[in-house]
Amino acid sequence: MRSEAQLIADAGAIWRAGVAAVDSRRLVQDILSVDAHYLTIGDHRFRLADLRRLIVVGAGKAGAGMARGVLDAVSDSLHDRVFGWVNVPDDCVAELPYIHLHAARPAGLNEPTERGQLGAQKILALVSEATADDLVLCLISGGGSALVPLPVDGVSLAEKQLLTQSLSDAGATIEQLNTVRKHLSRIKGGRLASACRAPTMISLIISDVMGDPLDMIASGMTIPDTTSSLDALDVMRTFQLHQDDRFTGAIRALQHAVPNPPAFATQSVPIVIGNNAVAVDAAGIEAER
Protein backbone atom coordinates (compact mmCIF):
# COMPACT_ATOMS: atom_id res chain seq x y z
CA MET A 1 0.00 0.00 0.00
CA ARG A 2 1.28 3.44 -0.94
CA SER A 3 1.91 5.92 1.84
CA GLU A 4 0.10 9.24 2.15
CA ALA A 5 3.24 11.04 0.94
CA GLN A 6 3.40 8.78 -2.12
CA LEU A 7 -0.28 9.37 -2.91
CA ILE A 8 0.23 13.13 -2.67
CA ALA A 9 3.21 12.84 -5.02
CA ASP A 10 1.11 10.73 -7.41
CA ALA A 11 -1.69 13.31 -7.43
CA GLY A 12 0.83 16.05 -8.20
CA ALA A 13 2.34 14.04 -11.05
CA ILE A 14 -1.10 13.37 -12.54
CA TRP A 15 -2.02 17.05 -12.39
CA ARG A 16 1.31 18.14 -13.90
CA ALA A 17 0.89 15.67 -16.77
CA GLY A 18 -2.49 17.18 -17.62
CA VAL A 19 -1.13 20.71 -17.54
CA ALA A 20 1.97 19.82 -19.60
CA ALA A 21 -0.20 18.25 -22.30
CA VAL A 22 -1.82 21.62 -23.04
CA ASP A 23 1.27 23.80 -22.68
CA SER A 24 0.51 26.53 -25.20
CA ARG A 25 4.07 26.99 -26.41
CA ARG A 26 4.59 23.29 -27.08
CA LEU A 27 1.19 22.86 -28.76
CA VAL A 28 2.10 25.50 -31.34
CA GLN A 29 5.58 24.06 -31.84
CA ASP A 30 4.03 20.67 -32.54
CA ILE A 31 1.78 21.90 -35.36
CA LEU A 32 3.94 24.56 -37.02
CA SER A 33 7.26 23.98 -38.78
CA VAL A 34 9.50 25.52 -41.42
CA ASP A 35 11.97 23.86 -43.77
CA ALA A 36 14.03 25.21 -46.64
CA HIS A 37 11.01 25.66 -48.90
CA TYR A 38 7.76 25.46 -46.93
CA LEU A 39 5.91 26.74 -43.90
CA THR A 40 3.69 23.92 -42.66
CA ILE A 41 0.75 24.42 -40.30
CA GLY A 42 -1.10 21.19 -39.66
CA ASP A 43 -2.11 19.83 -43.06
CA HIS A 44 -1.53 23.15 -44.83
CA ARG A 45 1.72 24.04 -46.64
CA PHE A 46 2.82 27.45 -47.92
CA ARG A 47 5.76 28.07 -50.21
CA LEU A 48 8.23 30.43 -48.59
CA ALA A 49 9.05 31.92 -51.96
CA ASP A 50 5.42 33.07 -52.28
CA LEU A 51 5.12 34.41 -48.75
CA ARG A 52 5.78 38.10 -48.12
CA ARG A 53 4.67 38.26 -44.48
CA LEU A 54 3.37 36.02 -41.73
CA ILE A 55 1.01 38.29 -39.81
CA VAL A 56 0.33 36.97 -36.31
CA VAL A 57 -2.67 38.29 -34.37
CA GLY A 58 -4.79 36.96 -31.55
CA ALA A 59 -6.08 37.16 -28.02
CA GLY A 60 -6.29 34.97 -24.96
CA LYS A 61 -4.72 34.00 -21.68
CA ALA A 62 -2.44 31.57 -23.52
CA GLY A 63 -1.46 34.18 -26.13
CA ALA A 64 2.06 34.77 -24.83
CA GLY A 65 2.96 31.08 -24.86
CA MET A 66 1.42 30.61 -28.28
CA ALA A 67 3.37 33.57 -29.67
CA ARG A 68 6.59 32.11 -28.26
CA GLY A 69 5.71 28.81 -29.92
CA VAL A 70 5.41 30.54 -33.29
CA LEU A 71 8.79 32.22 -32.91
CA ASP A 72 10.38 28.96 -31.76
CA ALA A 73 9.00 27.07 -34.75
CA VAL A 74 9.91 29.45 -37.57
CA SER A 75 13.47 29.43 -38.76
CA ASP A 76 15.83 32.39 -38.66
CA SER A 77 15.27 32.87 -42.37
CA LEU A 78 11.56 33.55 -41.77
CA HIS A 79 11.91 35.81 -38.74
CA ASP A 80 12.23 38.96 -40.81
CA ARG A 81 8.83 38.22 -42.37
CA VAL A 82 7.02 37.65 -39.06
CA PHE A 83 5.26 40.43 -37.20
CA GLY A 84 2.08 40.84 -35.26
CA TRP A 85 0.06 41.86 -32.25
CA VAL A 86 -1.57 39.68 -29.57
CA ASN A 87 -3.78 40.95 -26.73
CA VAL A 88 -3.01 39.27 -23.39
CA PRO A 89 -3.63 39.93 -19.66
CA ASP A 90 -1.19 42.27 -17.95
CA ASP A 91 0.72 39.49 -16.18
CA CYS A 92 1.45 37.74 -19.49
CA VAL A 93 3.27 40.64 -21.13
CA ALA A 94 6.88 40.08 -22.15
CA GLU A 95 9.27 41.53 -24.69
CA LEU A 96 9.28 39.34 -27.79
CA PRO A 97 10.89 39.99 -31.15
CA TYR A 98 8.51 40.62 -34.06
CA ILE A 99 5.25 39.97 -32.14
CA HIS A 100 3.94 42.61 -29.73
CA LEU A 101 2.20 41.33 -26.59
CA HIS A 102 -0.29 44.01 -25.62
CA ALA A 103 -1.52 44.42 -22.04
CA ALA A 104 -5.26 44.44 -22.65
CA ARG A 105 -6.69 44.03 -19.13
CA PRO A 106 -5.60 43.58 -15.51
CA ALA A 107 -4.65 40.08 -14.43
CA GLY A 108 -7.57 38.20 -12.90
CA LEU A 109 -10.22 40.66 -14.15
CA ASN A 110 -12.07 39.11 -17.08
CA GLU A 111 -13.71 42.34 -18.23
CA PRO A 112 -13.12 44.47 -21.34
CA THR A 113 -11.11 47.67 -21.02
CA GLU A 114 -10.17 50.69 -23.12
CA ARG A 115 -6.69 49.18 -23.47
CA GLY A 116 -8.24 46.03 -24.90
CA GLN A 117 -10.23 48.12 -27.35
CA LEU A 118 -7.06 49.87 -28.51
CA GLY A 119 -5.43 46.50 -29.13
CA ALA A 120 -8.50 45.19 -30.93
CA GLN A 121 -8.35 48.16 -33.29
CA LYS A 122 -4.72 47.35 -34.04
CA ILE A 123 -5.52 43.68 -34.72
CA LEU A 124 -8.40 44.60 -37.03
CA ALA A 125 -6.17 47.05 -38.91
CA LEU A 126 -3.43 44.45 -39.40
CA VAL A 127 -5.72 41.87 -41.01
CA SER A 128 -7.54 44.55 -43.03
CA GLU A 129 -4.24 45.76 -44.48
CA ALA A 130 -2.99 42.26 -45.41
CA THR A 131 -2.29 41.61 -49.06
CA ALA A 132 -2.53 38.69 -51.48
CA ASP A 133 0.95 37.40 -50.65
CA ASP A 134 0.49 37.47 -46.86
CA LEU A 135 -0.64 34.71 -44.52
CA VAL A 136 -2.55 35.56 -41.32
CA LEU A 137 -2.13 33.34 -38.28
CA CYS A 138 -4.63 33.95 -35.48
CA LEU A 139 -3.84 32.67 -31.98
CA ILE A 140 -7.01 32.15 -29.93
CA SER A 141 -7.41 30.88 -26.38
CA GLY A 142 -9.68 31.18 -23.36
CA GLY A 143 -10.51 34.69 -22.21
CA GLY A 144 -10.02 36.03 -25.72
CA SER A 145 -13.48 37.55 -25.93
CA ALA A 146 -12.95 40.06 -23.11
CA LEU A 147 -9.47 40.88 -24.40
CA VAL A 148 -10.66 42.23 -27.78
CA PRO A 149 -13.64 44.51 -27.13
CA LEU A 150 -14.51 46.57 -30.20
CA PRO A 151 -18.12 47.79 -30.26
CA VAL A 152 -19.80 48.83 -33.49
CA ASP A 153 -20.16 52.53 -34.28
CA GLY A 154 -22.70 54.26 -32.07
CA VAL A 155 -22.20 51.92 -29.11
CA SER A 156 -19.77 52.79 -26.33
CA LEU A 157 -17.76 50.22 -24.45
CA ALA A 158 -19.56 51.26 -21.25
CA GLU A 159 -22.98 50.70 -22.84
CA LYS A 160 -22.03 47.28 -24.11
CA GLN A 161 -20.64 46.30 -20.71
CA LEU A 162 -23.84 47.44 -18.97
CA LEU A 163 -26.00 45.56 -21.49
CA THR A 164 -24.00 42.37 -21.03
CA GLN A 165 -24.27 42.67 -17.24
CA SER A 166 -28.01 43.38 -17.44
CA LEU A 167 -28.62 40.33 -19.61
CA SER A 168 -26.53 38.17 -17.30
CA ASP A 169 -28.37 39.43 -14.21
CA ALA A 170 -31.69 38.70 -15.93
CA GLY A 171 -30.72 35.06 -16.47
CA ALA A 172 -29.59 35.05 -20.10
CA THR A 173 -27.74 31.94 -21.22
CA ILE A 174 -24.20 32.15 -22.59
CA GLU A 175 -25.64 31.53 -26.07
CA GLN A 176 -28.01 34.48 -25.68
CA LEU A 177 -25.25 36.70 -24.32
CA ASN A 178 -22.93 35.84 -27.19
CA THR A 179 -25.67 36.43 -29.76
CA VAL A 180 -26.03 40.01 -28.56
CA ARG A 181 -22.32 40.61 -28.02
CA LYS A 182 -21.35 39.34 -31.47
CA HIS A 183 -23.77 41.61 -33.28
CA LEU A 184 -22.55 44.64 -31.39
CA SER A 185 -18.91 43.87 -32.21
CA ARG A 186 -16.69 44.72 -35.15
CA ILE A 187 -14.45 41.73 -34.48
CA LYS A 188 -16.47 38.86 -32.96
CA GLY A 189 -18.81 36.44 -34.70
CA GLY A 190 -16.49 35.94 -37.67
CA ARG A 191 -16.03 39.62 -38.34
CA LEU A 192 -12.25 39.45 -37.93
CA ALA A 193 -12.12 36.90 -40.74
CA SER A 194 -14.58 38.98 -42.79
CA ALA A 195 -12.17 41.91 -42.58
CA CYS A 196 -9.12 39.86 -43.56
CA ARG A 197 -7.62 40.61 -46.97
CA ALA A 198 -5.06 37.80 -47.04
CA PRO A 199 -6.05 34.70 -49.06
CA THR A 200 -5.82 32.48 -46.00
CA MET A 201 -6.31 32.96 -42.27
CA ILE A 202 -5.41 30.01 -40.05
CA SER A 203 -6.64 30.04 -36.46
CA LEU A 204 -4.79 27.98 -33.87
CA ILE A 205 -7.27 27.46 -31.04
CA ILE A 206 -6.81 26.30 -27.46
CA SER A 207 -10.30 25.57 -26.24
CA ASP A 208 -11.48 25.95 -22.65
CA VAL A 209 -15.11 25.21 -23.57
CA MET A 210 -16.46 21.67 -23.25
CA GLY A 211 -17.15 20.16 -26.67
CA ASP A 212 -15.07 22.82 -28.46
CA PRO A 213 -17.91 24.84 -30.07
CA LEU A 214 -15.79 27.03 -32.32
CA ASP A 215 -18.27 29.91 -32.42
CA MET A 216 -18.17 30.12 -28.60
CA ILE A 217 -14.41 30.12 -28.01
CA ALA A 218 -13.40 33.80 -27.78
CA SER A 219 -16.79 34.57 -29.41
CA GLY A 220 -15.76 32.95 -32.70
CA MET A 221 -13.70 35.80 -34.16
CA THR A 222 -12.80 33.76 -37.24
CA ILE A 223 -15.82 31.44 -37.39
CA PRO A 224 -18.94 32.09 -39.52
CA ASP A 225 -21.78 33.29 -37.30
CA THR A 226 -24.99 31.27 -37.32
CA THR A 227 -27.09 34.04 -35.74
CA SER A 228 -28.36 37.37 -37.04
CA SER A 229 -28.92 40.86 -35.69
CA LEU A 230 -32.64 39.99 -35.61
CA ASP A 231 -31.82 37.16 -33.22
CA ALA A 232 -29.94 39.64 -31.02
CA LEU A 233 -32.99 41.95 -30.96
CA ASP A 234 -35.17 38.98 -30.00
CA VAL A 235 -32.90 38.29 -27.03
CA MET A 236 -33.28 41.89 -25.87
CA ARG A 237 -37.05 41.65 -26.22
CA THR A 238 -37.08 38.42 -24.24
CA PHE A 239 -35.54 40.21 -21.26
CA GLN A 240 -37.51 43.46 -21.73
CA LEU A 241 -34.44 45.50 -22.63
CA HIS A 242 -35.46 46.54 -26.14
CA GLN A 243 -37.07 49.79 -24.91
CA ASP A 244 -34.56 50.56 -22.16
CA ASP A 245 -33.20 54.10 -22.62
CA ARG A 246 -29.80 52.99 -21.35
CA PHE A 247 -29.32 50.89 -24.49
CA THR A 248 -30.48 53.29 -27.19
CA GLY A 249 -27.22 52.98 -29.10
CA ALA A 250 -27.26 49.19 -29.07
CA ILE A 251 -30.92 48.98 -30.13
CA ARG A 252 -30.38 51.43 -32.97
CA ALA A 253 -27.26 49.58 -34.13
CA LEU A 254 -29.08 46.24 -34.21
CA GLN A 255 -32.10 47.69 -35.99
CA HIS A 256 -29.96 49.19 -38.74
CA ALA A 257 -27.44 46.35 -39.09
CA VAL A 258 -27.29 44.04 -42.07
CA PRO A 259 -28.99 40.96 -40.57
CA ASN A 260 -26.16 38.57 -41.43
CA PRO A 261 -22.43 39.30 -41.48
CA PRO A 262 -20.72 39.41 -44.89
CA ALA A 263 -19.26 36.26 -46.40
CA PHE A 264 -15.56 35.63 -45.91
CA ALA A 265 -13.30 36.80 -48.71
CA THR A 266 -10.49 34.80 -47.12
CA GLN A 267 -10.20 31.07 -46.52
CA SER A 268 -10.62 30.77 -42.76
CA VAL A 269 -9.18 27.54 -41.35
CA PRO A 270 -9.76 26.79 -37.64
CA ILE A 271 -7.49 24.20 -35.98
CA VAL A 272 -8.07 23.15 -32.37
CA ILE A 273 -4.62 22.30 -31.01
CA GLY A 274 -5.50 21.83 -27.36
CA ASN A 275 -8.58 21.33 -25.19
CA ASN A 276 -9.88 19.81 -21.97
CA ALA A 277 -9.93 16.33 -23.49
CA VAL A 278 -6.20 16.46 -24.27
CA ALA A 279 -5.43 17.44 -20.69
CA VAL A 280 -7.69 14.77 -19.20
CA ASP A 281 -6.28 12.05 -21.48
CA ALA A 282 -2.72 12.89 -20.44
CA ALA A 283 -3.70 12.92 -16.78
CA GLY A 284 -5.40 9.54 -17.25
CA ILE A 285 -2.31 8.01 -18.84
CA GLU A 286 -0.17 9.23 -15.94
CA ALA A 287 -2.72 7.92 -13.44
CA GLU A 288 -2.58 4.46 -15.04
CA ARG A 289 1.21 4.54 -14.96
Image (tube, rainbow, N blue to C red):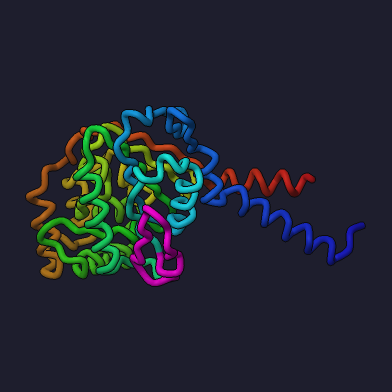
Q: Is residue 67 above or below residue 241?
A: above
Rendered location of residue 202, percent (x, y)? 36, 38
- Quadrant where the image shows the N terminus: bottom right
Is 286 included in the stretch rendered in magenta? Answer: no
- Name which residue lies at 47% across and 32% down: 42
Residue 96 or residue 58, whichever sits in front = 96
Q: Residue furthest front?
A: 77
Q: Quadrant of residue 76?
A: top left
Q: Is residue 229 visible?
A: yes
Residue with the most extreme right position: 1
Tag count: 0
The image quadrant that residue 177 belongs to is: bottom left
**In-front residue for pair 184/248:** 184
| Picture residue at 37% right of the left edge, 54% below the top | 99
The location of residue 187, given as percent across then percent down, is 24, 50
Kindly identify the residue that appears in the image at 44 percent across and 51 percent down: 67
Image quarter of residue 154:
bottom left
Q: Which residues are magenta?
A: 89-108
Rendered-image quadrant of the C terminus: top right
Location of residue 157 in the rendering, given as x and y in whole percent from the top left corner:
21, 66
Q: Is residue 167 shown left or right of residue 174?
A: left
